[in-house]
Amino acid sequence: MRLVTGGVVGVCVWAALSPLLPFVPVPARFLLVWLLFTLGPGVAAGAWLTRDLDALTRTVVLLGIGSAATAVLVDLLGHVGLLAAYPVLALGLAGASLAVWGRGSVARGPRISWADAAVCLALVALAAGIGAIVFWHRLVAVPDGTLLNGNYDSFDLSFYASIAAEASHTVPPTASYYAGHQLNAAYYPQLVLAMVHRFAAVPLLSIYLRYSWPAFLALGALTAFVLVRSIATRGVAFLAVVFVLVGGDFSYLAAWFLPHATIQWDYLLWPTNFLSPTMEVLQFNTWTPSLPIFFTALYAVVRAGRTRARGWTVIAALLLAVLFEFKPFAYIVLMAGLCGAALFSRADTAGRWRLAATVGFGVLFTLPSVYAIATLPAQDQRSRLLFDFLMLPRRMLIKTDLTDAFASLANRLAPLASLRTPVFLLLATVLFFLVGLGVRWLGVRGVGRAIRGDASPDAPAWRVLGWTVVAGVTIPCVLVTDPYVDTLQFYETGLYILWIFTALALVGFARTRRRAGVVAIGLALAASLPSSIHFLAMKWTDNQRPPLTSITRAEMSIADYLRTCDPNTTVVLQDRPFAPSLMAVVSERRVVLGWGRTYYAVGSESRFRDVESFYMSARGDPGAAFETLRRYHVTHVIVNEQRDRVHPDVLARLRPILGRSGFTLYAVPSPAGP
């Protein structure tokens, strides 16, 4: 009766809340609905299992579980055509579960530690402050429309927004930026945001370019704190999360002292030149929405070892499977870390079997996702795994323009010609790890102790973390992706966990030598900050450089009309296919080609040529232009009268629908043709 009553109350809450949402300020509306949509499925999935935790820890863990559960719920509803029922189910599940929140042993459970609560509040404030700096000037309203500032970071965020635009009406989403193709990307991070947009009417550009990433980062910080706090002191947990949020490597030394006279040098993210960005990518990469699931999965592994409860093992395996749909590279590294910890658990037979069960169930739950990837058409497969030895150090030398210098040094040091390549790779690898690990070198000794293990109660948990670091560092030394840029995400997984060991070493030193320890912590933070400060300074001055792209008021009017068209059949042709397609985001309709770089749209070269030829067809063959419309099933064409040169015979056969400030939207007759 309590469950039924709670479920009905939850549904009634949504029924009462939804009409009031338009009157709520947009930032508060986003935060409220995002939290409700995340917590609801999380409470349903983990309320009973977490009943012995204090309220703060329980809420954070349930939000982490909910980050995975809500994506699964959206995906399941999309497959059966019931997306419209999502908010009712999410709030109904929340109400039913909250109705029994206080029952059981939680009534006798631990109270909230107000010191932990204060630390959590400080971490949320830090994440929000960083987000304010990074996103303050990214999306700017001007009299004629909206500007999108930034570099490839904004490019990536607008790409994710296009996935959410498609997912707001079609789940699983197709490639809206590459109409007619399946989406070869981990789309789970975008699902809850698509639902916030659909049911709370929060604009997608505001969601992705203002609010969501700082919110995800704050939740990631909380789940990381809860994980580390469960096996270490409050100070270790706080310092570890601070390092995750603001810490970087020693790449600033290269930026300061090397000429780096090459187009390969990354002027925005200095650590990318040593393939070790961590703090920076949290402001635009899907690492950020993945962190809550990543750290909550590790927390579930820790709880499974402590409580010996099978429920925690199952939750850990389920979170691992969902992590595959959020960040498959982190999934691979974490599974390898669990395997390493299981194989080297020595006398802990029970712990070994628990870890083996987690891995086994995790693989089992992941099989549907693996099958979906394996059955993708060849033309939609974006990347592949290859074996290559020490590729990242070699790429580092290219980006820093040091290849010739290191080859010359290897020739001088190697007594035999056959040894020159090994010496070259050794020198490159030493520099790669020396600079890339940076302050994290302080945690390497702790990793060694963790994988050896001891008799302490928390040794199994530290062993898992230690082997995860080892896996993250060693996998990209032998296994790479094509294109190579995804390879460093294996490495980043280990780097995030290595911050925990770094904080453990520093706090341990400060515990025995208080004054020297405080100085050491201050110096470590100072040594890890310059690259991060450079990135924040670049983001704060984004509005002082030319915008990445823009959308005018006239184009917004066209997008408003397109939203009234059938999302399942509408395909829009627009010019500038290499530019970020804000039209696909705002109109929520598919475009023939946007984000035309081959990294996103595999095999798009011929499609790009067709689009370019259409918009320069004035002196060409109108039949070829009509063939482009037929080939890509185009229903609408956007023409900019100032820059486009479409053949007049083609325009004569199209039906003008809307004209604004030099932009005209045409409908294409069906079938298109002379």
Image: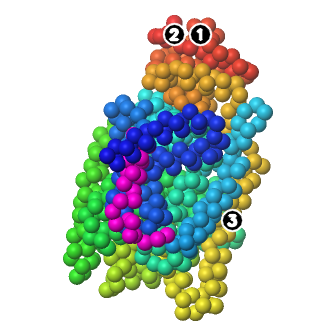
Residue named by callout 2:
669
Side (left or right) of 334 relative to 434: left
Q: Position of residue 448 (x, y in %)?
A: 40, 81
Looking at marks 3 and 1 on the same chain, the residue that comes earlier in the sequence is marked by 3
Most common SS among magenta residues: helix
* Residue at left offset 57%, top offset 48%: 31
Which amino acid is tagged 3? Answer: Ile
Relative to the observer, which residue lies in front, 412 or 355?
355
Identify the secondary structure beneath mark 2. Answer: loop
Which amino acid is tagged 1? Answer: Arg
Residue 655 marker: 1
Which amino acid is tagged 2? Answer: Pro
Q: Report the magenta residues as a range.
A: 89-112
Q: Position of residue 554 (x, y in %)?
A: 70, 24
Dot 1: within a 10 Å radius of its alpha carbon, few (fewer than 14), some, or many (20 or more) residues? some
Residue 203 marker: none
Relative to the observer, which residue lies in front, 184 or 102?
102
Residue named by callout 3:
533
Identify the secondary structure beneath mark 3. Answer: helix
